[in-house]
Image (cartoon, rainbow, N blue to C red):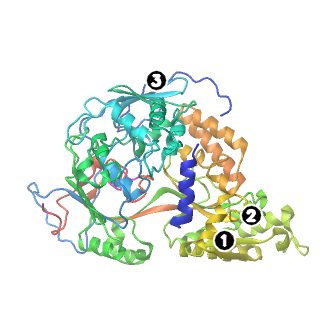
Amino acid sequence: MRFVKYLIGLLFVLFALAACEAPTPAPRPTWTPSPLPPPASLNTATPTKPPATATPAASVTPAATATATVTPTATPNPRPKVLRVGRASYPDTLDPQRAAFGNGLDVLRLVYEGLVTLDEKGNLVEAGADKWTLAADGMSLTFNIRAGMKRADGTAITARDYEFALKRAVDPRVSGKAVAYIVYDVLNAAELDTSDPLKTKTEDLDKLAASVGFKAADDKTLIVTFRKPLGYWAFVAATQVAFPADKKTLDAAPENWWSKPEAHNGNGAFKIKSIEAGKKIVLVANENYWRGKPKLDRLELIYDTDRAALLDAYKKGDLDLLAAVAPEDLAQVDADATLKNDLTRLPIALTHAFALNSARKPFDDRNVRAAFSQAFDREGWVRETLKGVGKPYTRWIPPGVIGATPDKPGAPGDAKLAVLTLVNNGYAARDSTPDKPKVDCAKLGEIKLTYNRASSAQLARMQFLAANFTKAFGCPVTPEALEPAAYNALFLDARTMPQITFRSWVNDMPHPANWLSAYWVCGAYSGYYGYCNKNLDTLIARADRELDLNTALGLYQQIEETLLKDVPAIFASYAENVNLIKPYVKGLKERASANDTDWAGASGPAWTYDIDLTQVPANYPDK
């Protein structure tokens, strides 16, 4: 059911190199959410309606800059409030249903809003819908579209716009869709998405599309029907699959409509003013935004693949925020008092791991998997291979994802314990003694670290692992370089998949189901390297259909603990968002979240972000 994303994940690795019976649920009340404060539970809160204008973000005491001349003023400053963000990579698409990476999503989140959104703690907050009701049997979710919702040009947005967006996310005639799998639990969504448009008649595709469980009952009511009881789908409604692009402009140029600024007639806090491909995207405040006009007048995303040039622009005051500071620049930043003061490092929802192929010896033995996880030097991995950007981590669900338990211990890191784990479970050498435990390398068997010869990143990872494990066990662990075609061919079957492969996972949906249900069930991603636990699948199915959020989160936490005991992978680290932010920029750091995969605040309440014009330097934009 999640085949599309499995293939995308596999291709990313190859080419980018980089449910059981549950008790009958009680009826669930309608929830009318509020941006501040967020509700504690999806099913129980009944907060008040928000004011028309959002509450300003908390003030931050500014720090002096080394190069800026600050000119306070007692009268209103005529300058516009502009946020200039330096980015190293330009989006490959700005089509909501095709976008998968942060460099496109950070733009789309400014221009569009889904049915709901999330706060920095992962709580659901109203957006296109002002309330939603989960059916008592968990088989449907009804969204009430906010009255007066408008596009940037002032035209109305109705439930039919959201129906169009969501059905487009699984329309096989739309090429390059990235995350269609996250709506596969909707009735007939998977069946439509996996249809072959070249072998299926248009009328049959249209008939199947009409049967998909996204229905606008009227202009104000959207009903989402599932193929099984489901408790978490409101979180899906916050993602880009529900961003309501304008059908009129999209139909005019289906493949490249998104490259034209005027085609983006969205409902977000900003609208696109200009696009200079590869160089700059300028957004201006959307005066028709339902929360009211944002505090920022303009937001400029400035792109340059030369990271040193971006850092220089920040130092000169030509940028207000530098996204993703390069690891090689951290020493320079740390040595500069002003830059160091501007530096912010926050965890993001991206985890690194080394998958252990349970279908191949010796990793078909859980004890061997546990020993290799124990022997892994996570601190050295972050220091030497990630160049200090990231944090060692022994769990799978990263900090900041709702329901994550980052403070609980995962796999212990202890090379001596790793040797004992092997020695005590059938891999002891003949001359092993309690005082000097020794592993029999012949019993352990051949360990090859296969990698793509064309990838310097893969080489660096495998060289680190080889040195790490050879030192820990005293057994040869050998990097094996293959030509790209030969390497890629191994991934077609778990029995030929390399013994150890590097994996990364990032939020597509900010919910533990995206980390567990989408990845670790039998036949999902983990099937590529032979992992399958039917008992875990049963528990996952139970958690997915649990209608009470807090109860579901408890179940997902149990699932992660079960997963850690199975040791299907060496959980290694989580990623960090490393940014430079000027002290006169207000609200971004305070409202940053794990969903900000590219710059602090990228997924947050952009309508509240502000600039203290009394603190800006002399070369700050004056028009």
Point out the tag, 3 or 1, that comes first from the N-terminus.
3
Q: Nearer the viewer, residue 251 or 236?
A: 251
Considering the numbered disc 2 on the image, is that residue within a helix, a strand or a loop?
helix
Q: Which residues lie in the magenta part? A: 588-592
Report how far apart the C-alphas of labels 3 and 1 lie in the structure: 54 Å
Residue mark closest to the camera, 3 vs 1 = 1
Q: Are marks 3 and 1 in contact (CB under 8 Å)?
A: no
Q: Is residue 39 magenta?
A: no
> Which residue is pictured at 75% across the width and 69% down the height?
416
Residue to which mark 1 is pinned = 450
**Label 3 Cα neighbours within 10 Å, binned few <14 / some 14-19 / many ≥20:** some
Indicate the amino acid at tag 2: Ala
In the drawing, what numbered circle is on residue 400?
A: none
> Which residue is pictured at 66% across the width and 67% down the height?
376
- In percent of width and height, residue 497 lies at 68, 62
Q: What predominant SS class does the magenta segment belong to?
A: loop
Q: Are marks 3 and 2 in contact (CB under 8 Å)?
A: no
Residue to which mark 2 is pinned = 371
Indicate the amino acid at tag 1: Thr
Report whether 591 appears left or right of 380: left
Point out the tag, 1 or 2, that comes first from the N-terminus.
2
> Which residue is pictured at 85% across the width and 69% down the height?
443
Residue to which mark 3 is pinned = 29
> Which residue is pictured at 36% across the width and 43% down the height?
243
Report whether 289 appears left or right of 233: left
